[in-house]
Image (spheres, rainbow, N blue to C red):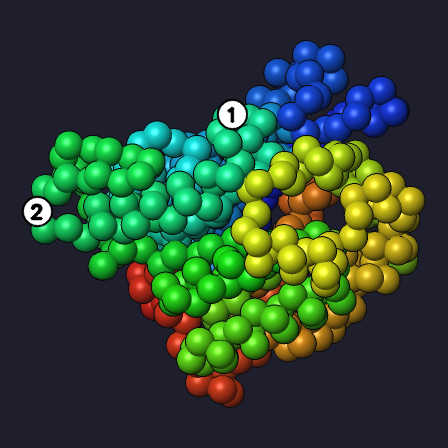
Amino acid sequence: MKISMFHLMPYRDLPAGFEKKYNSSWFTLPFPKVADANKAAQYYNWTLDELQFAAAAGFDGICTNEHHQNAYGFMVNPNMMGSVLARATRGTNTAIIQMGETAVFLNPPIRVAEEYAMLDCISEGRMVAGFPVGLGGDFAHSYGFAPMEQRGRYREAHDLITKAWQAEEVFVWNGKYYQLPMVSTWPRPVQKPHPPVWVPGNASPSTWDFVLQNNYCYCYLTYFGAKGADKTVGGYWKRAKELGRDNNPYRLGYLIPVGVAETDQAADDLYARHIEYFYHKLLHIPEALFMPPGHMTHSSLSYLITKRPLPPFDTLKKSSYRDFKNNEYLVTGSAESVTEQLLSIIKRLRVGNLMLLPQFGSMPHETTMENIDRIAKDVLPHLRQVWDDEGWENHWWPENCKQQTRQAA
């Protein structure tokens, strides 16, 4: 079992009542009206400190991510963050999980091939390459692409990047979206044939097919509860069987916010306002902005309409911390309670690569560091052996990070 710390790096101090004045915390929210660059500077450094501390405390991996033009998460260049973390953790077996640099946002996408290869070299072969399709809102609103091109550009970018990592000779690329007279990527990744690939997704069957056909790890990144995840994750495992893939739990990554305190009541008192800030303020966005028409495939759109795996965003504002907790949107409590809840989710969903979110919403730096410490000392040791009795190998973890089991410092 591999457990990593994921970090969104949100803006932690939005003014009270901003959601009544502005229609969204994504894309249309003007930075100068609600935020401060000095605080942003503080948040970047807090984030790096928190991730570095998680690595030292015993997490197996540390995860960066990419979003644009929003308060929900403004780690706009994950590779800049990853390079700092790779250097700071040199000599350890901590995986640097770039969840990722979105290939379709860079033109040409061989820039991703180059930067990932560079990061794999800096980390000395400890990098995981994230290949997100990217949010439709980022693609259309932040970068001005036509939504209907998103999937086509993604597939072509993927093929170009993976070939650039492995080709023995200089080659020409004449694709539909990208044309390059000569591709000769310097450097190449340390890991051969390339770093393990993780593909984040939400509820798209076309992404399942892409992941399974390429034998990658599918990472279900949802904030709408493990109870609601049963249906989607069950669909993924069913599709894996149909395509002839085994049910190795390491094929699946799962993300969930976690808060540990001395007692269950102490956790409720400590974390309630921060998770409500997360759902009420940071996920304050009209669905039309989040999912512009045209960016989904027919199969994914049909699945979304008929199965409705995600709740309408406007219902989040009517829900309280207790509602979120009861539906397993997050896991909070004493170390014993959190361990019990996480074990249930892990086994029910069949998760081999677990990503925890110890900082969420408005949670301050000191509270985050204490939470990381509690999780590392009192929860992680009870989760690591979950799948050992089934004898599976984690093919989606860097070889240079498999040499020993992480222990809390």
Picture coordinates of residue 112, whole percent (x, y): 33, 38
Circle 2: element type: loop
What residue lies at 24% left-to-right and 33% top-to-bottom? 179
Residues 252 and 128: in front is: 252
What residue lies at 69% left-to-right and 64% top-to-bottom? 229
Residues 240 and 194: in front is: 240
What residue lies at 42% left-to-right and 37% top-to-bottom? 104
146 vs 116, left or right, is: right
Circle 1 packing at 10 Å, graded few (<14), some (14-19), many (20+), is: few
Look at the numbered discs 1 and 2 and tell me whether their residues touch, using CB distance below 8 Å: no
Q: Which residue is mark 1?
A: 144
156 vs 290, left or right, is: left
Report the disc number at residue 169.
2
Mark 1 / mark 2, whichever is N-terminal: 1
Q: Tell me if I can see residue 89 in this picture.
A: no
Res. 274 image quadrant: top right
Q: Kindly identify the amino acid type of the residue bearing the numbered disc 2.
A: Glu
Q: Kindly identify the amino acid type of the residue bearing the numbered disc 1.
A: Gly
Picture coordinates of residue 102, whole percent (x, y): 44, 40
115 vs 32, left or right, is: left
CA separation, marks 1 and 2? Answer: 34 Å
Q: Residue furthest bottom?
A: 389
